[in-house]
Image (cartoon, helix red, strand yellow):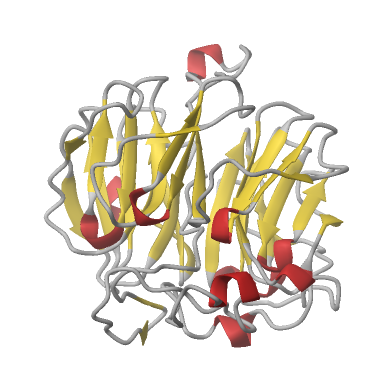
Amino acid sequence: MSPFRSTWTREAPGAFAGVATTPRAAHRIGPPPPVRDAPARARSHRPAAHLAIIGLLAVLAPGSAGAESAVQAPLAIESLLLDGAVVGSRMVVVGARGHVLVSTDDGASWTQAEVPTRVLLTAVHMHDERTGWAVGHDAVILRTDDGGATWSIVHQAPEEELPLLDVWFRDARTGFAVGAYGYFLATEDGGETWTPRTISANDFHLNALVPVAVPASDSSGPPSQRLFIAGEAGVAYRSDDGGANWRELSSPYAGSWFGGLALDEDQLLLAGLRGHLFRSADGGETWAEVATRTRATLTGAVQLPSGRIIVTGLEGSVLTSDDGGRSVAGSRLASRAGISAALPLSDGGVLLVGEFGVQRWPGAD
């Protein structure tokens, strides 16, 4: 579930949805919130800056989380979408204006869900074919118990003016949500209540939760107790006890990570700004850079059932690896549209998620 979950960056400019940002000289610059001013605690020591995805988020996601329900829109599947999840025969994608769409036929057709918010939704996680969670701006957390057809708000804090950027559940009761400025929430009752936690003294953005992949041959087994977080300014964390405790890893790069992929407890990929992709074979203790031959920001990675790894990025970038991420081959969409995530299809194909909505990747055919 590695979308372009972060709507923030402190590094150099990028572009998404055709809106370019303005260059800045400083390497670390503080992001403005997409709707309103940054929290006072952030403004006090970070200069104003710009968004990494699009400058239109203030238009796309206005208002508080509970103000209005998402509008049923015929072209919602062609609007900005940021993340997706696949479980069994069901696919769920989320994005702008509170849009959630569900497919039960491998992405051939989609039905828009009933969602009680219009804020930008940044990430989705499906625990099984019935139960799932989505997160987004205003610290909103949504839950579904019917496979994504309808959703309810289980947490929101618009007064904190912070987005959540990713969500993941270890089991039916234990889950985590992360976001801007070190925002970390945990639940142990299936998402009924959420408790803020501090995992570090710094307040770098926590952009993505990276769980260890469960082999398809052992999907009924217990999840790994190891979990990673990809963050801003080269920050990455690892937990070896299911998220109870965290330690910061030595980073090979000072720019932000926007996504990652843990093939097992030791093999880890982190993807980030300016085409940077790094691989670790020892759980993040040491790193080797993977040559990508692109300067486009990389947004996430997924492993297909075949073993092939797909790394997505802005400017229509799609990187593929057939050797566990040790090397990649690059391609690019003709449209150069930004891609936020890739989802495996049952026929071996790949569904791309991004500023265009969803589309099948022709390179998989």
Number of marks in the rendered image: 0
Quadrant of the image occupied by residue 315 = bottom left
Task: Examine the rendering and report whether any part of residue 190 can be seen.
Answer: yes
| Picture layout, residue 26 above or below residue 89 | below
Quadrant of the image occupied by residue 189 = top right
Q: Is residue 104 left or right of residue 165?
A: right
| Picture layout, residue 297 above or below residue 227 | below
Query: In x, y percent, where is residue 180?
Result: 56, 60
Residue at x-position 77% and y-position 44%: 147
Residue at x-position 57% and y-position 53%: 182
Q: Is residue 279 left or right of residue 356?
A: left
Task: Examine the rendering and report whether any part of residue 349 can be seen.
Answer: no
Query: In x, y percent, where is residue 20?
Result: 34, 85
Residue at x-position 73% and y-position 68%: 160
Q: Is residue 183 left or right of residue 298?
A: right
Query: In x, y percent, where is residue 72?
Result: 76, 75
Query: In x, y percent, where is residue 141?
Result: 75, 55
Q: Is residue 217 left or right of residue 311?
A: right
Residue 98 vs residue 344, the one in the foreground = 98
Residue 210 vs residue 149, the one in the foreground = 210
